[in-house]
Amino acid sequence: MDWEPRDFPENNVTDVHPLKELVTLVAGIAAATIILTLAIAFTLDIGMRALPAAWEARLFDGLWSDLDEVDDERHAAAVRLVDELALDWPENPYTFQVFILDSPDPNAFALPGGAIGVTRGLLDSVESENELAFVLAHEIGHFSGRHHLRGISRTLAVTVVLGAVTGGASGTMLTQWVSEVTQLGFAREHEEEADRFGLDLVEKRFGHVNGATGFFQKLPDANAGTVGRLGAWFATHPVSPKRISDLRRLARDRGWRASGELTPLDPSFYAE
Amino acid sequence: MDPLLQIALQVGPFLFLLLFGFIIGTLVERSHYSDIRKREAKTRTLPVISFRRAPPSWQVSSGTLVSGSTVVSIDYFKRFLAGLRALVGGRIASYESLLDRARREAVLRMKEQAIASGYDAVVNLRLETSRLASSNRKGQGTAGVEILAFGTAVKRGA
């Protein structure tokens, strides 16, 4: 038998430049991720809009029980105001509940199932029923547009897809960041829509829109901290002056009276 | 904090590791391959066969066990590429060159041992691979891979 020296085989390594491999993989996976996320978000969005309010209430029943809800003597007045405002929304499928939250920051939330969360800070800062009514009507506006659910569908889609791609735990920070960014434009659009709906309810109840923007005027600096180079874009809630001027323009266009007598708050607001 | 700065702070370390792994990894791989080819040329004349017995014509007079082993780890860049591959499937090209180097290095060490001990050939070459578990994350993940080449070095009579 003859023996011939041979070199070690050089056929075991795929001849591909690592950078080309990187670009191909990153671009391909990113494209697939985006398409998949959009598809899921779109599907969920359709489902969420079609979800009957009664199912929604059952689905999210008890979900908010871990909020640090507090007893507040102003609760009854807030509930009454919400119910009265909702009378001017004939298609209302919800039975609203109101939660008072123990937070000094003035804020309000629309939560799935027809729950409206209001902070003590908000109740402390309002000076007329018109002001409070607009904030509550704004939240009712979120229910009318089903914004509270549609926001969830986006977050859910991003969480599911990115969680799968990045392998769960390692992706949580990224997931949070991406879902926040995808919410931004969407959220702002929703805020403006809810503002328009809210102002309409206020006008129907009081016959004028005076005092509606009072709450925003108290928050001129609330967004100032976030207004940087990208601040205006990153702000979920439009900067107050812009919101106020948008509302004034809307009132003018619809021919709503901008002046009128302010209704005082329920006596429970003045009891100390 | 400026959002742009925040993003940069979060993505920065990752990009640094990726770039670091790519540059250092590429340089190391290039110099390793050139070293491997040089030593392969030098040890070319020592026959290595995978038959269990030496051919009768070799008239083997003595034999001993020789072995060469390498333990390899992976750079961040290659690991990242492999991670992306794990999502979509296909050849993990970034691991191929790494294991190719490890295999050839192991065989070279074995051959160099045989030559140094004055043997003429190696028969019954075998290659074995074992995974070294990482000590972190509850032993999940791989710290590295060992490749062991071993065979019987023989002296030829007449």
Image (cartoon, rainbow, N blue to C red):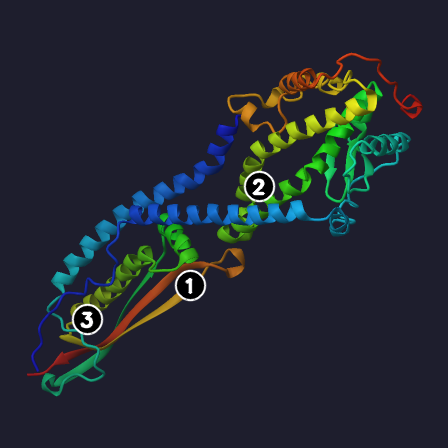
**Percent from the top left, x then y, of residue A235?**
59, 27
Residue at image position (64%, 43%) is A152
Residue type indicated by callout 1: Leu
Residue at image position (69%, 30%) is A194
Q: In this rendering, is residue A112 above or below A270?
A: below
Figure quadrant of residue A272 = top right
Q: In this rendering, is residue A155 above or below A268?
A: below
Q: In this rendering, is residue B62 above or below A5?
A: below
**Percent from the top left, x then y, of residue A189?**
60, 30
Residue type indicated by callout 2: Gln
Residue type indicated by callout 3: Ala
**Percent from the top left, x then y, of residue A225?**
61, 21
* Pointer 3 chain: B
Assign a secondary structure to mark 2.
helix
- Quick check: marks 3 and 2 in contact, CB under 8 Å? no
Q: Which residue is mark 1?
A: B132
Residue at image position (14%, 85%) is B55
Q: Nearest to the eye among marks 1 and 2: give it.
A: 2
* Pointer 2 chain: A
Pick whichever, B147 or A225, lies toward us: A225
Left/right of residue A243 with respect to residue B74 in the rendered view? right
Pick whichever, A30 or A84, lies toward us: A84
In 3D space, how far apart are the residues under numbered discs 1 and 2 (Cα atoms)? 34 Å
Left/right of residue A91 with respect to residue A30 in the rendered view? right
* Pointer 1 chain: B
Residue B83 visible in the shown view: yes
Pick whichever, B135 or A159, lies toward us: A159
| Picture disc at residue B114 | 3
In 3D space, how far apart are the residues under numbered discs 3 and 1 (Cα atoms)? 27 Å
| Picture disc at residue A176 | 2
